[in-house]
Amino acid sequence: MTQLDLSRFDALTFDCYGTLIDWETGILSALRPILIPRGIAAGDDDLLEAFARHEAAAEAGPYLRYREVLGRSLRGVCADLGLEPSADEVTRFSGSVVDWPAFDDSAEALDRLHARYRLGVITNCDDDLFAASSRRLGVTFDWVVTAALARSYKPALTGFELAFETIDVPRERILHVAQSLFHDHVPAKQLGLTSVWIDRRHDRPGAGATPQAEAAPDASYPSMLAFADAVSAPRP
C-alpha cells in the first residue's frame, strides 16, 4: 500500500464492532456460559466463524433488529453443535452487546483523532445497543448512522448512502476506518470512498467473526493507536 496523505480528509467514519469495540471477546464471553454447562468445548475460531456465517445470513434478509439478528445467530451456532438454547439464553445473548468491551486503545485514539477530524459511525446495530457501546468509548460522535436508521446492514450500501446524506462533508474528504473487509471495505470501494483498514487480527489467521472477503483498502494499521500516531506524525 502507498502512504496515504491523511491531511486530505475532514471527517472520519468508523465501523464500531470489531474496530472500536472488541466484539470477538464479547461474542465468546456471551457464548461460553451457554456452551460450557452442556459440555461443549468448541474452539474460539470455530465459534467465531460459525457466528459470522449465521449473522451474515440473518443480516442479508428482510430487516430485523440487531437483537433479533443475534438471536438467530445464536440459534444457528447452537444448531451446528446439536443443541437448542433456552429462551432466556437467547434473550441474554441478544442483549449482550452492552457488555462487549472496548479495545484498550479505542478511547484514547478517538480523543486524539477528534482534535483533528469530525467523527462519525456507520454501524450494524440497534440505536440503544450502540448508545451503550458509545459510552464505553468516551467520545461524542458528530454523526451516528445505525442499521436501525438505515433499515439494512452492511455490506449493503444503504447505511453508507444515508451517511453521505447526513454528513455535510464532500465524499472525497471523508475517510472510512474499519476492521471488516466484508462489511466495510468492499462497499466503501464500491462507493469510491478512501478507506483505512484497522487490521485487529494481523497476528492471527482467519477472519474471525466476519466472513472472508477480498478488498483493497488504501492504508492499513494494526490498531487504532497506530492510526492515531500516523495522523499525529509530522509530514515528510
Image (tube, rainbow, N blue to C red):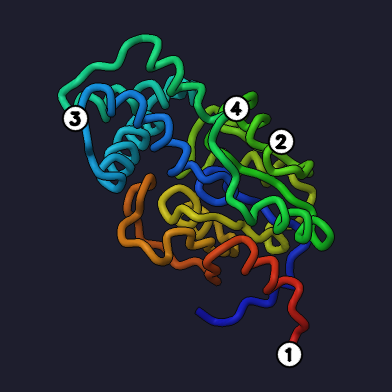
Q: Amino acid at mark 1?
A: Pro
- In terms of depth relative to the viewer, which is nearer, 46 or 5? 46
The residue carrying mark 2 is: 135
Q: Residues within 10 Å of mark 3 (few under 14, many from 20)?
A: few
Element at badge 4? helix
Q: Which mark is residue 80?
A: 3
- Compute the Cα span from label 4 to label 2: 10 Å
Q: Earlier in the sequence, mark 2 or mark 1?
A: 2
Q: Nearer the viewer, mark 1 or mark 3?
A: 3
Element at badge 3? helix
Q: Nearer the viewer, mark 1 or mark 4?
A: 4
Q: Which mark is residue 236?
A: 1
Residue furthest left in the image:
82
Q: Nearer the viewer, mark 2 or mark 1?
A: 2
Q: Amino acid at mark 2?
A: Arg
- Labels 1 & 3 near each other (Cβ < 8 A): no
Q: Amino acid at mark 3?
A: Asp
Residue 228 in the image: above or below residue 46: below
Specify whether 18 is left or right of 236: left
The residue carrying mark 4 is: 129
Picture quadrant where residue 42 is located: top left
Q: Earlier in the sequence, mark 2 or mark 3?
A: 3
- Compute the Cα span from label 1 to label 4: 42 Å
- Labels 1 & 4 near each other (Cβ < 8 A): no
x and y percent of residue 210 in the render?
A: 38, 47
Residue depicted at x 79% and y 48%: 168
x and y percent of residue 120 in the render?
A: 71, 47
